[in-house]
Image: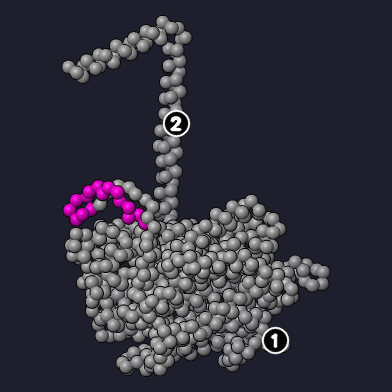
Amino acid sequence: MNEQKNQEWNLLVPLAPAIALVPLLAVMGVEPIDLGFAAIAAPLAMFPVVLLIGQIWNGNETWVSRFKEGGILALSALSVSLIAGLWMVLDFLGAGEKKAHGDPLTWLDFDVLRYDGTQWNIDAGFTNISFGIWLDPISAMLLFVATFLCFLICWFAIGYMTTDDINSNRNHRFFAEFILFSMGMFGMVLADSFLWLFIFWEIMGLCSYLLIGFYYWKESAAAAAKKAFMTTRVGDVFLMVGLLMLYDIYGSLDFAVVFDNPSTGVGEAPVKASELQPALLMLFIGCVGKSAQFPLHVWLPDAMEGPTPVSALIHAATMVNAGLYLVARMVPFVDVDYYGVMGMEDLGIIIAWVGGITAFMAASIAFVQNDIKKVLAYSTMSQLAYIFLGLGSALYLMSTGHRYEGLFVLGGALFHLFNHAMAKGMLFMASGSVIHEMHHAHHELHHHDGHGQHDDHDEHFDAQDMRNMGGLASKMPVTSIAMMLGSMSIIGIPLIGGFWSKEAIIAETWLGALEYEPLLLGPAILAVLTAGMTGFYMSRMWMMTFAGEPKHNAASHVHEETLWIKTPLITLSIVTATTGALLAFFHIGEFFSSKDYSMGLDDLDVTKALQIAFLPEKRTLMAVGYVTIALSTFVGPIIAMKVHGGSLKEGQEANVAVSWLVSLSAAFKTIDVSGMANSSLSDSLRKRLHFDDLYDWGISKTIAPMAKFSAWFDANVIDGIVKLVERTSIQGSHWIRTYTTGSTRDYILMAAVGALSIFILIMGVTI
């Protein structure tokens, strides 16, 4: 066993030169801010290498066993991005600067039309098509999240993808698309303009289509990929329109120009809210599509058709966070105390309401899901909605002059983005570990029962269905701990990661509703209710998977074995259990929002952090906080334990870290909820509140007829014109051939007639 582990670790040798690259660049004098180019270039350069070598060496033993079909090369590229990102972030923290802007790379020079406020003019020698690095607290945080999680998910994918026969000779395509996706996220986070943000945004959209539809021969996977692509494109159209409107207002899409003074546009003309607010609403619709918020949320649950590493990549590290990042970029436009535009209150209220509705709706649907990945998918929608709620509240408060409160909830929202990304990345990888082992256990049992006989198991066994699991706490200790800690963070158990950020969002939203804007009361109430619902469905997921007795024979034969899968889970378990509280003690929220962006050991204040969380100055906020804690920590989990809890199979024991939870679940008397489970409401929730039916109806009434018309137009008009030209050409050639006699006299006569005709024409024009 030890020899096998050593062989696995030896596979990491190619990472050594990749790890040494960034320090080498630093020694050569490359500025830390410019290392962002390396973070983007490394996966971009490795993309064609993995793809081409995989095509040439497909099936080669060295390629399969030594390079894991390209996974090791992909991991090497992502290690460059991770180290470059860490180097940049640490230098940024040490500098204590508000932002850092690297020198842009300019490589295009051409004439372009520019608008000076009154008319369009040709600007010769235009050279502003360039790409630079923009680093501030928001991008620094998201850069770390993206590079760190992409590296760990790729590590996990090497163990997950390369041990299934179904993926054999296809993994080079997976890893190539994986790192191109990652490159898109890195580029979007570091881009210094809305233009490049949009370009990298679309690269992610294309790669999401490819990765979700990785098992393209499955009809469900192909349909899910098309659904994701079409739904997000709806949002992207609005995003593009919004960017054009921004360009019309400011004459540029560069952050340095736009954020210098958002209240002043082209020609120093004052920017009106009636112009800017529609543009930002267009951008927000794009964010709704990318982050799967109501009503453009229908694609995200179906995206689970892709491999589990893809689910972790989309839900935690990259794609869905892109919309949140873009909304956070709207803050300077509404910060009226610092050159923001007056009259933008409605924008924040709209964003808050979309967040509140989505949070409650997604949590409701998660109640009845039995697919472990779909529970997590709806959890992602709900938790992202919390962040949208916080961002909307922040935008409203800052647009009305309540800057301190707005910055506080902004910090809480971005902190929740961090906590959710870490916890959800771990949860998806933990679910992948369960699915991976359930699949292999069923495969072994299905083909052989241990006595030389074929085991007659269900051919339609679903390794993702929690109704086939149970009792896995004794079989999968690392996975059970990881999923417990991740669930605690998502629920908001006190002192665990997500608690600090979720409480900040809910408290400040209630403050805004009670003291400034009654319209925020609706989202505030939905947020508290969702907290209790989250406690139920996340606890239900853990109980159905790890507590009680095995519900299928396959669940009795699972085990953990590969370090490729366990190592990321252990790493993120430590991060989730400790980092949330530690960053709260360092006042991470103030880092995102204050003028002083430095962080040091002298900022550590445990007492202040605990006071803000548990003993706020306002009694109303204290009451809201304790009601939230009661619903999420006690009411929701206890109900889940009463429905799905239970002792392990006799003779089975769980490790001490989770045994208390199993024992606690068994202490509650089980209640029968079959009547509720078979109700019309439950059926409606299982059908996702019929939104998918509306989606299918919309497709049948709009896109399908357009596709049929396009096919008819192509066949009858486009092809018709081509065929007409073809027929005319053939007839003309036959006509010409009749005059091609081979006689010199005939040719001289035609030349003379042609010359005379030209002479007459010239004379006529002259006269």
x, y (%) of residue 336? 23, 74
State left or right for residue 171 relative to residue 608: right
- Indicate the secondary structure of the residue bearing disc 2: helix
Magenta range is 115-130
Point out the image quarter for the C terminus.
top left
Q: Is residue 386 visible?
A: no
Is 119 magenta? The answer is: yes
State left or right for residue 335 relative to residue 637: left
Q: Is residue 620 visible?
A: yes
Q: What's the distance in space between the residues labelled 1 and 2, CA to CA?
A: 75 Å
Query: Mark on residue 498?
Result: none
Examine the image and state in which quarter residue 60 appears: bottom right
- Identify the residue at image location x=31%, y=60%: 253
Taking 653 as reference, is 735 above or below it? above
x, y (%) of residue 441? 70, 72
Residue placed under numbered mark 1 in the picture: 652
- Indicate the secondary structure of the residue bearing disc 1: loop
x, y (%) of residue 12? 63, 68
Examine the image and state in which quarter residue 190 appears: bottom left
